[in-house]
Image (cartoon, rainbow, N blue to C red):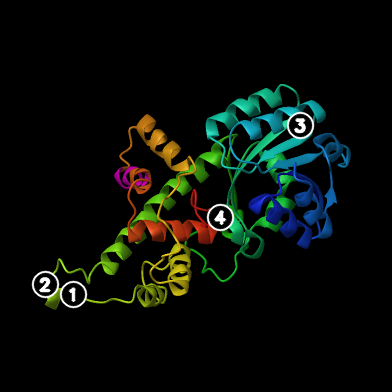
Amino acid sequence: MELGIVGLGRMGGNIALRLMDAGHRIVAHDVLAEARARLAAAGAEPAESLAALVAGLAAPRTVWVMLPAGAVTETAIAALADLLSPGDCIIDGGNTFYKDDIRRAATLQARGLDYVDVGTSGGVWGRERGYCMMIGGPAQTVNRLDGLFAALAPGAGDVPRTPGREGRDPRAEQGYLHTGPAGSGHFVKMIHNGIEYGLMQAFAEGFDILANKNTPALPEAERYDLNVADIAEVWRRGSVVSSWLLDLAAIALAGNESLSDYEGSVADSGEGRWTVFAAIEEAVSADVLSAALYARFRSRRDHTFGERLLSAMRYQFGGHEEQGSGH
């Protein structure tokens, strides 16, 4: 298959590379000439403008927009809508607010264009590991694009099959899923990221307690000089808290147990806030997820070991750098 990709950063560039590895044709555009050149060297066909990208695709065209949520994505989609023809499709694979998807889908449908929203998880490791995708949009269009999603997904790998799944959607076992109509993909990804906040905060607080067990505030007999890097490693092996986030924490701690190269100022991308907003709209209690979000706010004023670990995990999975620092 062929695909146009707009935005060749950490995620968009690796998505293009993984698709090319699977034999798909990629026409790639980025405002930065060096990003276009980098993908061209890997086999993509560079396009200096959105018009050139659209002209380089055969109908029905599909263009994947992988840009930061907000004005830059809105502008790109509006420009593409003026260039594309009925029957073509725009995919938004960024972290867009799901209500914006609903609005866009209705606007584009009136012009005969399909709109698909893809909640994409995998971070900077996606080219190697694959991307977990939560996909919203018309079923017919999602099915037509299945070859692209299957190539990007991690596949079943060596993850044991879940008992009792007979007769359910087999795509979920491959790491991608059609979740429903427009907006549903990004809604599911939004909740995924909200949960991620809570999981990361739990690890951060637990390791903070471990790291401070040698404090002079405790009786001497109750002080332990614990090796948190080794604790992270042993928990990876058969523990009920083993996970990819723990793997990433272990990588960071093995490299620098004190995490002194991180300040501990933890940003939030917006997904955590939107998750809390959704909980409020639904009158659903979300104590842990709300507290994890507020902890990130506080981290920008006062930093702990746990918050340095949060920063380290964010850098490990997504390449997210701290504001005003080397990480």
Left/right placement of residue 90 relative to residue 53 reads left
Comes first in the chain, label 4 or label 3: 3
Pointer 2: what residue?
219
Give the CA distance from mark 4 to mark 2: 59 Å
Q: Disc 1 vs disc 2: Cβ atoms closer than 8 Å?
A: yes
Where residue 40 appears, as percent x and y from the top left, is 83, 55
Seen in the picture, residue 230 relative to 111 is either above or below; the reply is below
Q: Disc 4 vs disc 3: Cβ atoms closer than 8 Å?
A: no
Amino acid type, mark 2: Pro
Residue 243 visible in image: no
Give the CA distance from mark 3 to mark 2: 66 Å
Pointer 1: what residue?
223
For residue 80, which numbered disc appears in the image?
3
Amino acid type, mark 1: Arg
Nearer to us: label 3 or label 2: 2
- Which residue is found at the position 65% from the left and 65% from the top? 128
The magenta segment is: 287-293
Seen in the picture, residue 181 relative to 35 is either above or below; the reply is above
Where residue 92 appears, as percent x and y from the top left, is 65, 39
Left/right placement of residue 233 relative to residue 206 reads right
Comes first in the chain, label 1 or label 3: 3
Pointer 4: what residue?
167
